[in-house]
Image: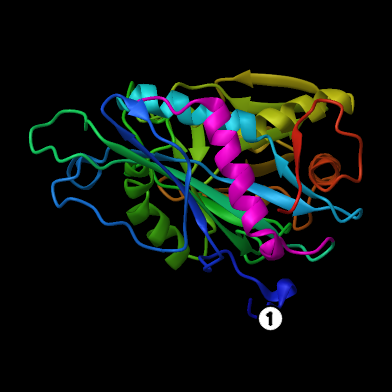
Amino acid sequence: MEKIDWASLKFGYRKANINVRCHYKDGQWGPLELSDSEYINMHIAAACLHYGQEAFEGLKAFTGKDGRVRVFRVDENARRMQLSCDGILMPQLPVETFIEAVRIAVAKNIEYVPPYGSGASLYIRPLLIGTGPQIGVRPATEYLFIVFVMPVGPYFPTGFQPTDIVIYRHFDRVAPQGTGRYKIGGNYAASLMAGEKAREGGYSAVLYLDAREKKFVDECGPANFFGIKNNTYITPLSDSILPSITNKSLMQLAEDIGMKVERRPVPVEELPSFEEVGECGTAAVISPVKRIYDADLDKEYLYGTEPGPWSVKLYSKLKAIQCGDEPDKYGWVTIVEPE
């Protein structure tokens, strides 16, 4: 293994030792297999290439002060992948198979888990693709599940520091009654153009509004949205929003520290009233927002140049559970021992 400067890691791909694979054929899942290849040999008519039949997940492993490696909420990721499978007609991978594949992938690459206090983590990417040839628009009959890992730094280069985000009404991430609640590649492909325009303008992300009426906040390109006011954690309710496991965790922790929690439609007109605003997700955990610019109305909403007090508390508490610095009373963490 090459020497890694853990503190300077960026969020990007890096080869580790092995990945874990599982094939679906003849109506059943096969055994887990190990591979050291970074490539897939695939039919040119594979359904994932032509009709986007693929789903993926993202989760992380952390080294604690005690030196033990912890994976955060792997069971929730397994169930969310099953939801995505239902949405685009792929066979569900059993939860126990998902968890075991993740465990093996982390254990076999244990030296790539960044040390405690480095600010980095091991990013885990489970991927499920339709590999069977299909030229008619129908589900594949064969599938491949893969788990690969890599050490990463913060998703946003600024880390836990407020950034600017932007509203563009002429872009939609997903259609009403579409696939927004599934973690599939097509939703992210649909966000690339708007995301690139945002970055060119100096923004970290796009804040999407509901595609039907443009009246309510949906989510940011790579993360869920939340706002805080009057000691209340508020996050949008919509069938077009990916059910973020980080957001789900933050809602529980918000209640634990004495906040109220509301998951409901959030009108655009409510944005100026928030005391704190943030994006949340596996990659960023919490990325505080200092400014939202509504490009179509030429309006801006300001939230401060430093992370707000509630965001700091929530971020610190979640990170402490992930790294074993606080008790895991909800059973969110899975310990992985080296093999």
Q: Quadrant of residue 172?
A: top left
Picture colour scheme: rainbow
Looking at the image, which residue is at 87% across and 27% down? 329
Residue 252 locus on image (x, y percent)? 77, 25
Residue 62 locus on image (x, y percent)? 75, 52
Looking at the image, which residue is at 32% across and 28% down? 90
Residue 54 locus on image (x, y percent)? 33, 39
In the displayed image of the protein, which residue is found farthest to the bottom?
A: 3
- Seen from the viewer's position, the closer of residues 318 and 54 is 54
Q: Quadrant of residue 134?
A: top left
Q: Is residue 6 above or below residue 307?
A: below
State the residue position of label 1. 3
Looking at the image, which residue is at 48% across and 41% down? 32
Residue 15 part of the magenta segment = no
Which corner quadrant holds the N terminus?
Answer: bottom right
Q: Is residue 186 left or right of residue 254?
A: left
The segment highlighted magenta reads: 91-116
Q: Is residue 11 left or right of residue 63?
A: left
Q: Is residue 81 above or below residue 32?
A: above
Looking at the image, which residue is at 87% across and 44% down? 324
